[in-house]
Amino acid sequence: MGRILDRLFVVFTLCLISFIAYSSQIFIIWPWYGRELTVELLTLLLPFNLLVAMLLWNYYLSVTTDPGRVPKGWQPNAQEGYEVKKLTRGPRYCRNCDSYKPPRAHHCKQCKRCVLRMDHHCPWVNNCVGHYNYGHFIRFLFYVDVTCSYHLWMVTRRVLSTSAHSYWDEPSGLELIFIILNYTTCVPVLLAVGGFSLYHFYCLLGNSTTIEGWEKNKAATLLRRGKIREIKFPYNLGWKRNIASVLGNNPLMWCFPNTPSGDGLKYPLADGQNSDDDMAWPPKDPNAYVYPDEDPNYQFKLPDSPWTYENGTLNPNLSTNLNKSNSQLRNRSHNLNKPKPKVVEGTSIVPPYHPDYREPGEDDSDIGIHDDTSSEDDYYQDEEGGGQPRSRIVRRGSEGLEARPIDREEILRRYVDETIHEPGRYNVYVPEPLSESEEEEEQDETEDSEDQPLAEKVEAWIANTVQTPS
């Protein structure tokens, strides 16, 4: 999917270039000149088509040219000097490619390999911009700027010519639509690519890449903070030699595609530069943490307890408490900022039938919140808490210990029964049992009332009501 999307970027770029280049000639310039081939028309369109051809040629080379890869088995030469790592100050090594990295080379995640003199990975060309195609990429940006400027000049001439009195100078409806479309496509391209190309022209004059530009900014920050002394960029040879190292030694051929000099494995340094550690590029932050060298004999060993903390002790934030449930531990961070309820001395914040109820004077700060969703099979009785209330029964879980869920209605019923049967607390009325004769009479009345029709019951009730004095 990624490769298909990258190719769609290339197809979209080609379609955009073709639309701007040829729709302006077919639907704007050709009708403007009366659809007749004249010397004036050729003089206008021939330079434009040459610029479009050079643009497409350099774009094709930017897409298809390999930016450069590290030869298999390449190793740095200690006598000629090499680019060092920031931390170990040793030769730069790529763990992904399992090989040494030459100076100015970097690993590209999209291309999955190290690229010589890597500048950046450009999705619009579906390729990395490196040692062998950086010149083509620079010329491509240059021709985009020049071609778009020439295109806007042509279309603007056509718009300004509407003040003429020739009858064919008035644009038709189709011509007016394409004038608007060409402006809306060409102007954003010129602004975006123009700003991007200005940055790359600046990098070309300083013989630096985009990645090295970030390193220069970091070095400037360290210098401004007084952490390092001034270190010059080692590859800045002067603007003429910098341009020649990318576009070629012949200035007349700078606008035409050519092969860059060198193999991309080593680059000339500026006068007075050497490979000493104090002068190495990129400069090292003296306050940066230096990772210790790996011990080849080190063997990883699991700790005795998974709840280790720092030097082997237990993490206090992970300590468990049988009086605390998992839900309470999870909500601890949310409850820190909540105001605590005010408790009057001699009272409790929970009712007496709550499993976390404490007698007045006891600490009730560890009151938990119970969950009613777990099964009883997951629970066990604490070894130290035999015979304690049910709230001390806990279960093991992936996050520690959790209090056993309790039916609150059952708790309330049990509390009421225990309170009622407490001796001396309530005077409970217990009716005397009925005698045998009274039980028989009550049973006969019940049977008679069940056999009596409903209408007779209603009449008897009305008669009793009328006879009863109000």
Image: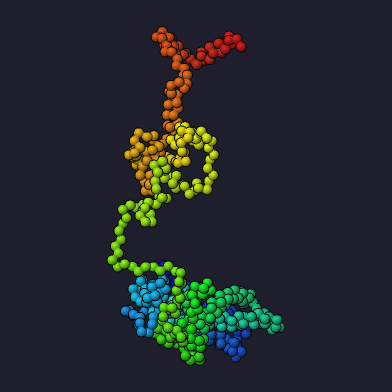
Residue 349 position in % (x across, y down): 50, 36
- Residue at x 45%, y 24% (from the top left corner): 420
Colour scheme of the rendered structure: rainbow
Q: Considering the image in quadrants, where does the N terminus appear?
A: bottom left
Comparing 265 with 419, the one in front is 419
Q: Quadrant of residue 269?
A: bottom left
Residue 3 in the image: above or below residue 369:
below
Q: Residue furthest top?
A: 437
Left or right of 334, for residue 158: right
Residue 464 in the image: above or below residue 187:
above
Residue 236 position in % (x across, y down): 48, 84
Residue 399 position in % (x across, y down): 38, 48
Residue 330 position in % (x across, y down): 44, 48
Comparing 254 with 441, the one in front is 254
- Residue at x 42%, y 42% (from the top left corner): 324
Q: Quadrant of residue 436?
A: top left
Q: Considering the image in quadrants, where does the C terminus appear?
A: top right
- Residue at x 36%, y 79% (from the top left corner): 70
In this figure, what is the number of numbered marks?
0
Q: Can see residue 18?
A: no
Residue 232 in the image: above or below residue 310:
below
- Residue at x 39%, y 68% (from the top left corner): 291
Q: Can see residue 291?
A: yes
Residue 270 in the image: above or below residue 218:
below
